[in-house]
């Protein structure tokens, strides 16, 4: 990372960024063409400092076809984004605050129904903010496409008001 002043290294901040975000952008290899980039919502689990991300969608499609061919992907989650408007008339003083986590991992097309249910419950817990009671039918579990992303490397960056104030 070029801007070391924007790098975040602590696990608690990484966990907070993942919890606060709601859209992950996946970068998937597309053979000789440009990378295929797709946003989607996600669920997650931390096991110590190991992050696993879950996405769901249709059981067939370009995303799944590309992952089947090359399961090494990149990702990005951005949260707490806010425009900084300066109090002076210097246009170059405008900026944008944010926090983000980005990294790489191995994408796995999940077929096990029990793991699919675990993934969908993690996604619901993340989006709703708590565990959701109720059943997921075997039919729905068999139909839905679930992708597990085993994160292998991460970087965190931040452009926030405190750091901006320290720069000016």
Image: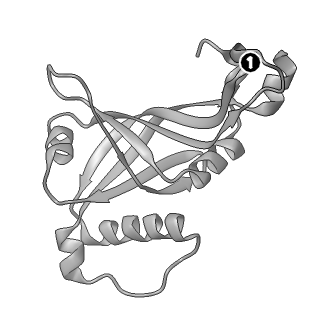
- Quarter-wise, where is residue 121 in the image? bottom left
Q: How far across and how far down the image is residue 95, in percent?
A: 68, 25
Q: How far across and how far down the image is residue 60, in percent?
A: 13, 55
Q: Residue at x 22, y 81 (%)?
A: 138
- Quarter-wise, where is residue 165 in the image? top right
- In the rendered image, the vertical position of residue 124 relative to residue 50, given as above or below: below
Residue 53 left/right relative to 155: left
Q: Residue at x 18, y 80 (%)?
A: 139
Q: How far across and how far down the image is residue 67, in percent?
A: 21, 41
Quick one: quadrant of the C terminus?
top right
Quick one: quadrant of the N terminus?
top right
Task: Give the farthest residue toward the bottom.
Answer: 134
- In the rendered image, the vertical position of residue 22 relative to residue 77, given as above or below: below
Residue 96 left/right relative to 44: right
- Badge 1 crowding class, 10 Å Cα cut-off, few under 14, some 14 to 19, many 20 or more, is some
- Which sits in the foreground, 166 or 63? 166
- In the rendered image, the vertical position of residue 22 relative to residue 107, given as above or below: below
Q: Residue at x 55, y 54 (%)?
A: 47
Determine the secondary structure under disc 1: helix
Colour scheme in the image?
one colour
Identify the residue position indicated by label 1 in the image. Answer: 93
Residue 149 left/right relative to 101: left
Q: Residue at x 26, y 84 (%)?
A: 137
Question: How many marks overall?
Answer: 1
């Amino acid at each position: 990372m070029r801007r070391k002043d924007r790098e975040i290294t602590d696990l608690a901040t990484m966990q907070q960024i993942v919890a606060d975000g709601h859209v992950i952008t996946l970068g998937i290899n597309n053979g000789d063409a440009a990378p295929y980039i797709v946003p989607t919502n996600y669920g997650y689990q931390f096991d110590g400092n190991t992050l696993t991300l879950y996405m769901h969608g249709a059981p067939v499609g370009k995303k799944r076809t590309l992952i089947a061919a090359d399961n090494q992907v990149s990702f990005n989650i951005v949260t707490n984004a806010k425009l900084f408007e300066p109090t002076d008339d210097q246009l170059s003083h405008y900026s944008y605050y944010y926090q983000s986590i980005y990294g790489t991992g191995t994408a796995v097309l999940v077929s096990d129904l029990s793991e699919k249910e675990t993934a969908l419950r993690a996604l619901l817990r993340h989006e709703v903010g708590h565990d959701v009671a109720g059943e997921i039918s075997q039919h729905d579990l068999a139909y839905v496409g679930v992708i597990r992303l085993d994160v292998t490397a991460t970087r965190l960056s931040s452009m926030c008001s405190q750091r901006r104030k320290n720069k000016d």
